[in-house]
């Protein structure tokens, strides 16, 4: 695609965004009417550089992007969707397949081996999932190791992470050296939930005919994770090492929860039909199913590492890949969801029933969960009890106890509150400020800006790999390298290790 074509697309997008069509531009003269001065002003299409100067928009990004490719349901999509932007298709979808179900099933099943081979090759080009663990460090369940990193591959010709961070953002962008590019859904045209293999082994009804998760199991949360209740800290893991299901929840929680909380938990465990997991032919499973429950992804009130797409944007190819966040400590959060402003757990339970943000699929017999408000309130009642894992080295004011912490951990805490600037956004009992921040990571690569994302709580963070909203940071070491680059912190290698040691205490 040449620059002239891109510029034409850019101008067309600006005109469309202003509600303008060429016929409208000519309409006042054709109809003999007097042009509205305001409309004349908004119709003035300026070159990108002029718009930036006039409105202070900063560097242009649309000129560096390609228009989205056609991507009907089931079509393979580029892994580098961050290179694309603008308008595409419709805001709406339907519960219709582009072909009969037997053909849909055969197409996806036959193509899956080749697709997954390409997915593995792409992920291997970006990451070295070597499987080495941090010595002596386990997740809160006490059995799964925490992986060491960084596992992102350094760009060719760059000798070290320190050498990379010594370059300017412009130079990293111009030389295409940024190692932490966004991750897309491996099949974004169909999208929806993709579960880890460990979950699918226990729940074969969630095995997809078309695609598997692209993150190896050692870099995902433990399964099943422990469940801690703020009302029964004396019991530690109330799940007793089991996955909480509709078949055992009453036995586990009878005598611990109120009737309202028990009802809320039951609803969180009840499967409901979703866009692609249901009993119709609009599905990505071989057999019909009841659907997916809230705790199928937020297993035991935590997360199993399943991915989905954010429901808050269109076109479909622009939606951000999202890891399932933990429910632990949500009672401390004033704002939920990565990009939307959801202000209560019961509201969250209510809106998340659509999963894919595609209410149009109701017309195809899939339908919403249609829970009454009193049920979503009770779901919120239970979620508000899910506590953080123990952090014995933290004081009641969320600082390290010098009598229990190592020298390295104390150095990490000092960096966290000082040179590394982590505490600018991560503070308080949940280690989050409850705000959305725009890191403007596109300064480091020629791609579509992702905009503001909610600060992720760091309390219990060792239990929630991979990191960032889309999992592009598989380890805590990658987290440190990422922020050292994008915030230009100039951390030394020992300082990075100190920060990781500190975060493992949270």
Image (cartoon, grey):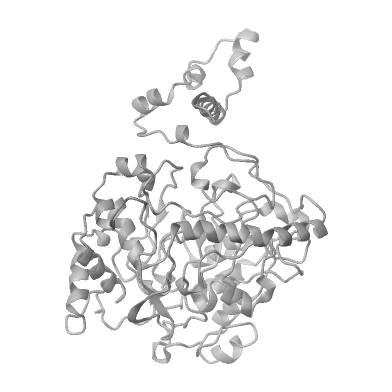
Residue 203 spot, x, y in % from top left:
65, 77
Q: Residue at x 28, y 55 (%)?
A: 159
Q: Nearer the viewer, residue 59 or 90?
A: 59
Q: Nearer the viewer, residue 386 or 451?
A: 451
Residue 284 spot, x, y in % from top left:
70, 62
Q: Residue furthest front?
A: 157
Q: Confirm whether residue 140 shows in the render.
A: yes
Which picture quadrant has residue 490? bottom left
Q: Is residue 250 left or right of residue 432?
A: right
Q: Residue at x 65, y 45 (%)?
A: 71
Q: Nearer the viewer, residue 71 or 337?
A: 71
Seen in the picture, residue 10 relative to 455 is either above or below; the reply is: above
Residue 6 spot, x, y in % from top left:
52, 29
Q: Is residue 206 left or right of residue 387?
A: right
Q: Confirm whether residue 275 shows in the render.
A: no
Seen in the picture, residue 503 relative to 156 is either above or below; the reply is: below
Figure disc tally: 0
Q: Residue at x 73, y 50 (%)?
A: 94
Q: Residue at x 45, y 35 (%)?
A: 64
Which picture quadrant has residue 482? bottom left
Seen in the picture, residue 245 relative to 449 is either above or below; the reply is: below
Q: Nearer the viewer, residue 438 or 113?
A: 113
Q: Is residue 491 left or right of residue 348?
A: left
Dividing the image into 4 quarters, which one contains the C terminus?
bottom left
């Amino acid at each position: 695609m040449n620059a002239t074509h891109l510029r034409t697309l850019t101008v067309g997008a600006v005109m469309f965004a202003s509600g303008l069509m060429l016929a409208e531009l000519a309409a006042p003269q054709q109809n003999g009417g007097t042009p509205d001065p305001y409309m004349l002003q908004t119709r003035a299409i300026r070159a990108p550089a002029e718009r930036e100067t006039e409105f202070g928009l900063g560097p242009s990004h649309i000129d560096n992007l390609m228009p989205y490719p056609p991507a009907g349901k089931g079509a393979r999509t580029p892994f580098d969707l961050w290179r694309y932007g603008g308008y595409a298709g419709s805001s709406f979808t339907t519960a219709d397949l582009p072909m009969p179900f037997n053909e849909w099933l055969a197409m996806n099943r036959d193509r899956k081996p080749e697709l997954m081979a390409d997915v593995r090759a792409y992920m291997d080009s970006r990451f070295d999932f070597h499987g080495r663990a941090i010595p002596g460090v386990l997740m809160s369940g006490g059995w799964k190791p925490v992986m060491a990193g960084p596992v992102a591959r350094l760009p060719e010709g760059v000798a070290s992470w320190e050498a990379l961070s010594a370059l300017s953002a412009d130079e990293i962008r111009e030389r295409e050296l940024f190692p932490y590019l966004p991750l897309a859904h491996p099949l974004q045209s169909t999208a929806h939930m993709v579960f880890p293999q460990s979950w699918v082994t226990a729940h074969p009804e969630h095995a997809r005919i078309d695609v598997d998760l692209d993150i190896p199991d050692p870099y995902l949360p433990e399964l099943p994770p422990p469940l801690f209740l703020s009302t029964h800290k004396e019991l530690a893991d109330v799940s007793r090492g089991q996955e909480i299901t509709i078949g055992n929840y009453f036995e586990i929680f009878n005598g611990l929860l109120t009737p309202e909380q028990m009802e809320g938990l039951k609803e969180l465990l009840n499967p409901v039909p979703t866009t692609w997991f249901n009993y119709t032919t609009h599905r990505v499973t071989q057999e019909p199913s009841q659907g997916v429950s809230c705790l199928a992804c937020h297993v035991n009130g935590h997360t199993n590492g399943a991915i989905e797409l954010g429901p808050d944007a269109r076109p479909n190819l622009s939606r951000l890949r999202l890891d399932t966040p933990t429910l632990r400590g949500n009672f401390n959060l004033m704002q939920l969801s990565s990009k939307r402003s959801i202000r209560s757990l019961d509201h969250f339970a209510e809106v998340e029933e659509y999963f894919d943000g595609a209410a149009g699929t109701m017309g195809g017999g899939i339908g919403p969960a249609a829970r009454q408000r009193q049920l979503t309130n009770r779901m919120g009642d239970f979620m508000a009890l899910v506590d953080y894992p123990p952090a014995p080295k933290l004081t009641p004011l969320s600082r390290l106890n010098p009598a229990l912490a190592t020298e390295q951990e104390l150095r990490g805490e000092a960096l966290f509150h000082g040179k590394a600037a982590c505490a600018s956004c991560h503070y308080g009992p949940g280690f989050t400020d409850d705000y959305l921040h725009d890191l403007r990571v596109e300064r480091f690569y020629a791609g579509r800006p992702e905009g503001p994302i909610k600060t992720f709580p760091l309390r219990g963070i060792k239990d929630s790999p991979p990191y960032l909203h889309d999992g592009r940071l598989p380890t805590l070491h990658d987290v440190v390298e990422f922020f050292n680059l994008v915030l230009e912190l100039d951390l030394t290698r020992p300082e990075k290790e100190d920060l990781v040691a500190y975060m493992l205490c949270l």
